[in-house]
Image (cartoon, helix red, strand yellow):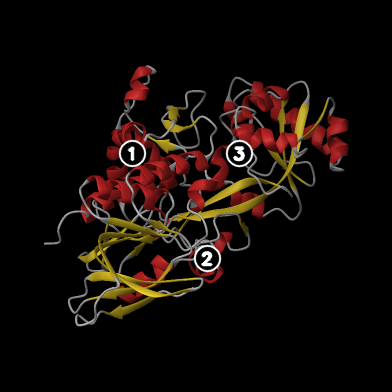
Amino acid sequence: MQAVIERHDPGTEWDMEVDVLVVGAGACGLAAAIAAHDKGAGVAILEKRERPGGNSSLSTGSVPGAGSRFQREAGIADSADHMVADLERMAGHSELPALTRRMAALSASLCEWLVDTVGARMALITDYCHVGHTVPRLHAPVSRRGQDLVDDLLAAVGRRDIPLAVNNAVSTLYVDDGGAIVGAAVTGPGIETSRIGARGVILATNGFAANRELVRTYCTEIAGAEYFGALGSEGEAVLWGRQLGARLANMQAYQGYAAVAYPHGSLLSWTTIEKGGILVNAAGQRFGNEDLGYSGYAKRVLGQAGPVYAIFDDRIKALASKEEEFQELVDHNGVKGSDSVAGLAAIFELPQAALARTLADYNQAAGAEGASADPQGRRHFGMAPLTGKLWICRVTPGLFHTQGGLAVDAAGRVLRDDGSAIAGLYAGGGAAAGISGSSGAEGYCSGNGLLTAIGLGYLAGRAAAEPRA
């Protein structure tokens, strides 16, 4: 991987010129290209991997929208202020608080833009609230698969005849004598290096979670977890930013996942836990408050000396089975059931007596009048107490996405340490700082990643389409 900054010789001709060059073809880059094109710009997209999508394809495709018409039609009262309160309650301190407010203010119209202009097949999820949200506000494909959202974005790019080249990695950004970004150099398997001039370059290259050195530097607490995200998340934006004197923000924040099914590698739907399931260690004991959510709880799972298991009942399994990925896990025997605690314990040779005590104590707390009865501090029990047939799945923690990156303004322009904007350079998604707080994973609310990916992509695309002053 190369991430070089070079001065452009004005006497050297470009091999190609466009108004806006988008680097990366995940949801951020695709949204940026559509937005720039629809503002009248000539656009091209470059993707270093063999296929578009990146982490967006691996997500559930969920985008929060506060105050959308889909909420109003469902009789759900919501607002940007309400969403900001939810996000700030979860995330605490953020180095870019204005970005949180900007994303919340944009969120409703962004979801409507995805449906009306992009043609995304999305609907409001009304079954329950997801991690961090106090009202139903996530809009997602019916399948809960991010690949469906990516496919819809790709179809919109195709209808607009926007060029998209895969296996084309950007190795170099070019600056002029004034420090403005004016183009990029592209390499790829079996092709000569090409130099592309652009009045605006949008970095949609994702985060740095696949760069182990950067993870050890900035996200030390999760550095021991396996990475389960897209392989292209190698941190070029951070490396370019360092050389350009760009400000980096929220670099210790990340999105973890506490329950990756082992050894299958697919996500065990957090619905199984959110709706009343629990996580136990090899001793058959709970070890924390599952209300922290799938991201915040990942560190707790990583801290266990041995295997960890998710346990839930038949009713919760039926609800989670509405999600295609979970049902596929069931079909591949990744979830095993028993009509008795003894049978459940035997599946993974857990100590039967300890597991029985854990379930009895948990069910008592879930059925109690006061939520303070739970010694782990859980307050939301969903459909618990757990009854009837029980199901178990071995899980492992994972790192999915870093939530820090280049500091940007309300138009997605990359900022220097002194607060000035780097002319011609924009960023969104994992390349930019996120809205999940300044450190750790407990500030991640469902949909935060896609909101900043698509939201900043949309804003950057529209801004980059404007003639440079």
Badge 3 crowding class, 10 Å Cα cut-off, few under 14, some 14 to 19, many 20 or more, is: many
Residue in view at x 44 percent, y 27 percent: 123
Q: Nearer the viewer, residue 197 or 330?
A: 197
**Image height check: is 134 above or below 1?**
above
Contact, CB < 8 Å: mark 1 with mark 2? no
Mark 1 or 2, which is nearer the eye? 2
Which residue is depicted at the point 63% across and 50% down? 300
Mark drawn on residue 84: 1
Q: Are marks 1 and 3 in contact (CB under 8 Å)?
A: no
Q: Secondary structure at mark 2?
A: helix
Residue 334: % across, % down:
75, 40
Circle 3: residue type: Glu
* Image position, residue 315 (x, y; %): 68, 22
Mark 1 and mark 3 lie on one chain; the one further toward the N terminus is 1
Residue at mark 1 to residue at mark 3: CA–CA distance? 23 Å
Residue in front for this viewpoint, 239 or 441: 239
Q: Earlier in the sequence, mark 2 or mark 3?
A: 2
Image side of residue 373 versus residue 345, left or right? left
Give me the disc on residue 290: 3
Q: Counting other residues with Cα less than 10 Å from the Cα at mark 1, is it few (<14), some (14-19), or many (20 or more)? A: some
Circle 2: residue type: Val
Q: Is residue 402 above or below residue 336?
A: below
Q: Where does the image place residue 146, in percent across and percent down from the top left?
A: 50, 41
Q: Secondary structure at mark 3?
A: helix
Residue positioned 55% across, 40% down in the render: 293
Q: Nearer the viewer, residue 61 or 222?
A: 61
Find disc 2 in the rendering and name its residue: 215
Mark 2 neighbour class, 10 Å CA radius: few under 14, some 14 to 19, many 20 or more: many
